[in-house]
Amino acid sequence: MADLQAIADAVIAGNRDEVAKLVQAAVDEGVSPADIINQGLIAGMSGVGVKFKANEFYVPEVLIAARAMHAGMDIVKPLLAETGVQAKGTVLIGTVKGDLHDIGKNLVSMMLEGGGYDVVDLDVDVAPEAFVTAVNEKSPNLVALSALLTTTMPSMKDTIDALAAAGVRDRVKIMIGGAPVTQEYADEIGADGYAPDAASAVDLANALMG
Ligand code: B1M
């Protein structure tokens, strides 16, 4: 039987080959990609975060764990995408200016793809003007902003302000998320919604799409 905790442990150990092997075995057994991500890959990175906070892990260990997690993501991502029959809408996603954290954003992106959305990923350190340009070029239904640093949370407000100044704010719904972000902050900066994790981001997107 698939051992999702073993996947989490292999992520924490930074064992890329083991993660790939275990994820493939879970897929072959018919475990849902969402369970593999939530109970295996995300659980593993959460454990990495705990160790990083406790100074048991330093940056190199974290990067090695992230690389191992990506080996698992590479296997489940196509399966998540396959589950969407017809796109529910287009989501423009990015980590805001000044912020290089992309693991959570990538998970949200994959879950949205699995939830039936076309996702345009602008990557990390995305300036407000780049979001404006992409809204004009891609005509998304939703704009999804991720931030992991308290120091980059204001970039979320800057992005919303830039979309308003460009006259395109009302053409999109804006959702935000990331470890330091809260519903209160979403209300404060005029975002349309906040999701605490990748799975809830899909529910929120569905709700915002009506
Ligand atoms: Co950074 N880092 N980091 N880091 N890092 C944190 C975030 C930190 C909390 C660690 C700590 O001090 N305890 C801290 C931030 C403190 C703060 O501001 N409150 C921190 C810091 C300080 C820094 C640097 C400044 C360190 C330095 O250089 N002195 C630096 C900043 C670089 C920059 O961005 N300019 C830095 C660098 C790095 C690495 C490059 C080493 C690496 C990033 C690698 C990468 O992303 N490719 C890294 C990592 C890995 C972390 C921790 C350990 C793990 C983050 C992570 O990937 N978590 C993190 C500590 C922690 O979280 N405990 C930390 C797993 C991921 C699945 O969770 O991203 O929260 P998360 O995403 C979740 C939800 O938040 C949500 O869904 C996801 C899945 O459920 N979510 C959304 C995310 N975006 C969403 C968007 C949505 C909805 C939900 O809608 C749009």
Image: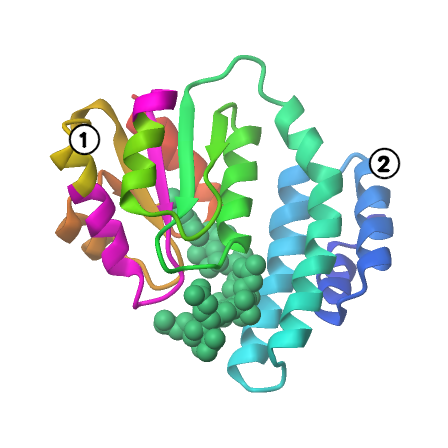
Q: Position of residue 163 (x, y in %)?
A: 20, 35
Q: Secondary structure at mark 1?
A: helix
Which quadrant of the view contains residue 134? top left
Image position of 31 (left or right of 206) = right
Q: Earlier in the sequence, mark 2 or mark 1?
A: 2
Q: Position of residue 180 (x, y in %)?
A: 34, 64
Which quadrant, please, contains the C terminus?
top left
Q: Position of residue 186 (x, y in %)?
A: 22, 50
Circle 1 residue: 169
> How far across and down, in percent of the image, does residue 41 sit?
66, 54
Residue 32 appears in view: no
- 61 vs 111, left or right, is right
Distance of mark 2 from mark 1, alpha carbons?
Answer: 44 Å
Classify mark 1: residues with Cα within 10 Å, few (<14), some (14-19) or many (20+): some
Image quadrant where residue 62 sits: bottom right
Question: Could you say whether the residue bearing mark 2 is in a helix, strand or loop?
Answer: helix
Q: Based on the picture, tell me whether residue 151 belongs to the magenta stretch.
A: yes
Residue 155 vs residue 197, the one in the foreground: 155
Tag 2: amino acid = Asp
Asked whether the beta carbons under mark 2 and mark 1 sit within 8 Å of each other, the answer is: no
**Residue 85 vertical placement versus 90 (above, below):** above
Residue at 74% from the left image edge and 54% from the top image edge: 4
Residue that appears at 24% across and 52% down: 183
Q: Is residue 99 above or below residue 177?
A: below
Residue closer to the observer: 33 or 59 = 59
Instruction: Locate residue 153 relative to residue 87 in the image: left or right.
Output: left
What residue type is disc 1 on?
A: Arg
Residue, x 37% and y 56% (percent of image)?
147
Which region is colored magenta? 136-161
The residue that disc 2 covers is: 28
Instruction: Give the camera-side residue of 181 and 157.
Output: 157
